[in-house]
Image: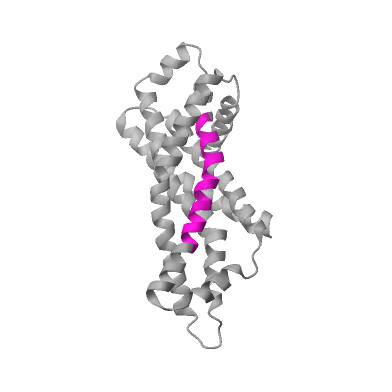
Amino acid sequence: MKSLHSIGKYFLMLGQVFRKPQKRGIFKDNVFKEIEELGLKSIGIVAFISFFVGGVVAIQTGLNVDNPWIPKYLIGFATKRSIILEFAPTFMSVILAGKVGSYITSSMGTMRVTEQIDALEVMGVNTLNHLVLPKIIATVFFYPFIIALAMILGIFGGWVAGELTGLYSVDDYVDGIRLDFKPYLIRYALIKTMVFAFLIATIPSFYGYYVKGGSIEVGKASTKAVVWTSVVIIVFNYFLTQMLLG
């Protein structure tokens, strides 16, 4: 029953998020602030992980197809498909759920326990719209660019790994990347990213906004937010894959 209560409360929160918008100037400033906090400051970790994981995927694929009957260009093909279909949109979203989700929950939870949210409500501000909607817009519209960067750097990491290890030639790797290229797969990945971005913005906001108690409860709420955001992303990944590719 507690889970059903939380789910219902979450959807009621979403209803409030899109009501009674704030002034346009303030809203625009908040959106740009959230883009910087939730997006721009995440590019470094995304770029670092994407590059090296792309290299690892390519090396592991190369070691597993070490057979004269298997063409080497399949290494580039398998690396490209793995990164575009799952690694970039799903794995990176889970990482962002940990980094960004904990930040959102802790910052909003701190505002709640220090009564800053209560003060805004006394002034007649729709606090959910003021605090959550800029986060939703910032993540939903900016994260596809981050994930596209992750795709590029992951594939590039595989190319660099081939140069350094000599497991496969650059020409074979590039041929594999070009083989059976389907633009729809990129659209599929970006659609998933936008859904995951919405979850990353709203679930941690829910836990932070409704936290009760002091700093210890804020820490517990951050942990719960990261765990449940990751779980929901994995579940949605299954259903989105079934709907979009099944």
Q: In this view, which residue lies farthest toward the top?
A: 123
Question: Percent position (x, y) of residue 118?
Answer: 42, 17
Pick the residue in front: 49 or 228.
49
The answer to whether residue 85 is above or below residue 171 is above
At 41% from the left and 44% from the top, the residue drawn is 42
- Is residue 140 magenta-colored? yes
Pick the residue in front: 143 or 192.
143
Residues rendered magenta in the picture: 134-155
Question: Percent position (x, y) of residue 74?
Answer: 56, 75
Question: Percent position (x, y) of residue 233?
Answer: 53, 49
At 48% from the left and 31% from the top, the residue drawn is 32
Whether residue 128 is visible here, answered yes or no, is no
Whether residue 193 is visible here, answered yes or no, is yes
At 63% from the left and 58% from the top, the residue drawn is 185
The structure's colour scheme is one colour
Quadrant showing the C terminus: bottom right
Left or right, 3 with reference to 239: left
**Picture quadrant of residue 23:** top right
Count the marks.
Answer: 0
Left or right, 246 with reference to 32: right
The answer to whether residue 185 is above or below residue 191 is below
At 44% from the left and 46% from the top, the residue drawn is 96
Pick the residue in front: 120 or 223.
120
Question: Percent position (x, y) of residue 195?
Answer: 58, 44
Task: Kindly report the secondary structure that dominates the magenta region of the rendered protein.
Answer: helix
The answer to whether residue 117 is above or below residue 205 is above
- Is residue 25 magenta-colored? no
Q: In this view, which residue lies farthest toward the front?
A: 171
Pick the residue in front: 76 or 7.
76
